[in-house]
Image (cartoon, rainbow, N blue to C red):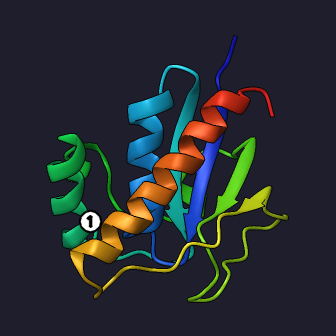
């Protein structure tokens, strides 16, 4: 049976959505296929996010992930917005959920860790909900 595709979407696809993709694969990669995308791209993933994810989980996001547009990923079964504090991206359909996370870019490590902990909590809920 084909795995359900879950996409995490934000404007730049450089921080929150990348963290969610990495944690999705880490915690629930056997149950789902995870993707992240934006309406714009950045030349690299947020370096604070990369550093902190390596510290906390031993995950190197730059190994398999890069900033990409929505048109670069398969059509998701579930589309989740990271939060619209920097403007909500238009993806051609309604979002299935909005996690309402603040963008930690330019903030302290403590703020990053708080956002990462929230993302982990949401990803684990996705995993436990399974067929939602």
What x and y, as percent, mark residue 21?
45, 48
Depth check: 4 or 51 in front?
51
Q: In the current view of this chain or complex, which residue is farthest to the right?
A: 94
Residue plotted at (81% across, 34% down): 132
Q: Is residue 23 above or below residue 20?
A: above
Residue plotted at (65% across, 29% down): 128
What x and y, as percent, mark residue 127?
61, 31
Left or right: where does residue 47 sit relative to residue 122? Answer: left
The residue carrying pointer 1 sits among few (fewer than 14), some (14 to 19) or many (20 or more) residues within 10 Å by Cα, namely many
What x and y, as percent, mark residue 114?
39, 67
Residue plotted at (32% across, 58% down): 66
Depth check: 11 or 23 in front?
23
What x and y, as percent, mark residue 1?
70, 10
In this figure, what is the number of numbered marks? 1
- In the picture, residue 39 is in which quadrant? bottom right
Left or right: where does residue 60 sit relative to residue 129? Answer: left
Q: Is residue 37 above or below residue 77?
A: below
Depth check: 88 or 51 in front?
51
Left or right: where does residue 104 sit relative to residue 2? Answer: left
Q: Does any portion of residue 43 appear in the rendered image?
A: no
Q: Is residue 72 above or below residue 110?
A: above
Instruction: Write down the residue under mark 1.
Output: 49
Q: Is residue 66 above or below residue 129?
A: below
Residue plotted at (73% across, 76% down): 90
Depth check: 28 or 33 in front?
28
Which structural element holds mark 1?
helix
Q: Does any portion of residue 101 appear in the rendered image?
A: yes
């Amino acid at each position: 049976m084909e795995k359900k595709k879950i996409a995490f979407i934000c404007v730049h696809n450089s921080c929150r959505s990348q963290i969610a993709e990495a944690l999705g694969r880490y915690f629930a990669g056997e149950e789902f296929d995870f993707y992240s995308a934006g309406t714009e791209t950045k030349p690299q993933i947020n370096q604070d996010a990369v550093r902190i994810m390596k510290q906390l989980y031993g995950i190197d996001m730059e190994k398999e992930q890069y900033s990409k547009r929505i048109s670069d990923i398969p059509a998701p079964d579930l589309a989740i917005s990271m939060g619209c504090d920097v403007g909500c991206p238009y993806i051609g359909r309604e979002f299935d959920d909005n996690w309402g996370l603040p963008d930690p870019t330019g903030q302290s490590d403590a703020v990053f860790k708080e956002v990462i902990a929230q993302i982990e909590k949401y990803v684990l809920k996705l995993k436990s909900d399974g067929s939602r």
